[in-house]
Amino acid sequence: MTNVKPYILKRCAAGLAGLLIASAQSAQFKTENVFLIISDGFRWQEVFTGAEAGLMNETNGGVKNPKALNAEFWRDTPEARRQALLPFIWSEAQRHGQIFGNQAKGSVVSVTNGKKFSYPGYNEILTGRGDPRIDSNDKKPNPNETVFEWLNKRSGLRGRVSLLGTWDVFPYIFNIERSRLPIWPSWEIQFEQSRINISGIVNDMVRDTTPIWDDLTYDSLLFHAATVHVQRKHPRVVFLGFGETDEWAHAGRYDLYLTAAHHVDDFVRRLWITTQNMRQYRDKTTFILTADHGRGSGPKAWRDHGEKVEGAEGDWIAIIGPDTPPLGERTDVGPITESQLAATIAALLGEDFHHAFPQSGAGISDALTDRK
């Protein structure tokens, strides 16, 4: 990446024994800021092998211009295809971080809530456990405290937590009426007092753009809003929820699904450059990338997910930051669950979420320090 300054990770793996477990308070990590970035329903299959040949057509993938799509994303090897689709992940994150979830190489990441759709998935990621009470995507306030709400109460972090997401259910997932966390967009009048103010051209773009979906705004608008907010307010804990990958998959448009994923990868690249060019963030920020659930496989099932869809529990996680040894794509490692991410986020900031909520998953530890 010619525009990304070389990111040299100076901390060796030996110095990270016990990373992200209950002894987090005794560890001195370099991370001072964490960004959790989710691309809704983006499959691990594309992350690790790139575009799938059997879906790059009109019949199975709703592709309008197969020739153009092949030129953009098809390559002869899985490694070349994934690089074409996700150049940031397979350059910076591969060289300077870790990527989990390639089931073909003995690395399994999964959701544990059993529902395998969005609200239960986000709840598991954000609270560290599945909750059988959350069994729909209905707009019901989350009864559970998320790691973002909890961190906002910790010394040094209060008022430094921000949420930006494209889906109108996020204010309920984060229970904004209770947590009072700042969010963009606010969607409904009862959340206006928590709305992050993004003035200028981004507001004009939101106002002047014709929406496709009633419950979702565009990923590009989210990216630009996040960039403005990070540059102006310097939040330390940030949630970014991109949604177009899931929407285009449900619509059966594999071409637009791939394009949306490619855009998210580029948004992450540009946001990484932004943060690394700011003193507040440079060499002390960790990005965690993942999805809230997987999808099915095959000519039809790739469009769907849910309790009855085989394989939709499969997921992936990529981590890049100053406290993550640069081991690249992990192979032949123990299983990881999305329920471990809440404790992982907190531990990177020197906080012990798992101790505060014992039913939550323990933070990722051996998977990050084992040099297999």
Image: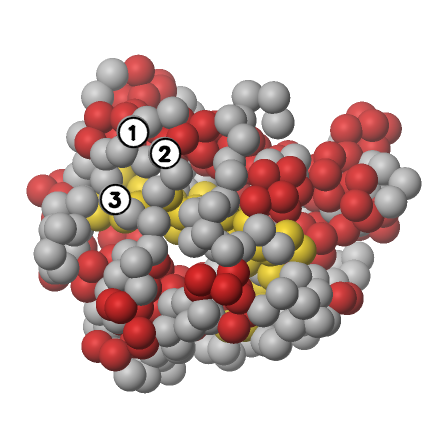
As measured in the structure, the alpha-carbon distance from the residue carrying label 2 to the one carrying label 3 is 12 Å
The first of marks 1 and 3 along the sequence is: 3
Residue in the image at 32% along x and 21% along y: 202
Q: CA distance from mark 2 to mark 1?
A: 5 Å
In the orientation shown, which residue stands out farthest toward the right? 76
Residue at numbered disc 1 = 279
126 left or right of 78 in image: left
Q: Are marks 2 and 1 in contact (CB under 8 Å)?
A: yes
The image quarter containing residue 90 is top right
Say whether residue 91 is left or right of residue 37: right
| Residue position marked by numbered label 2 in the rendering | 282
- Say left or right for 133 vs 264: left
Tell me residue 209's x, y (percent).
40, 22
Q: Could you tell me residue 303's position as x and y percent?
A: 66, 56
Q: Position of residue 89 (x, y in %)?
A: 60, 42
Specify the amino acid type for callout 2: Arg
Image vertical order of residue 280 relative to residue 190, above or below: above
Q: Which residue is mark 3?
A: 236
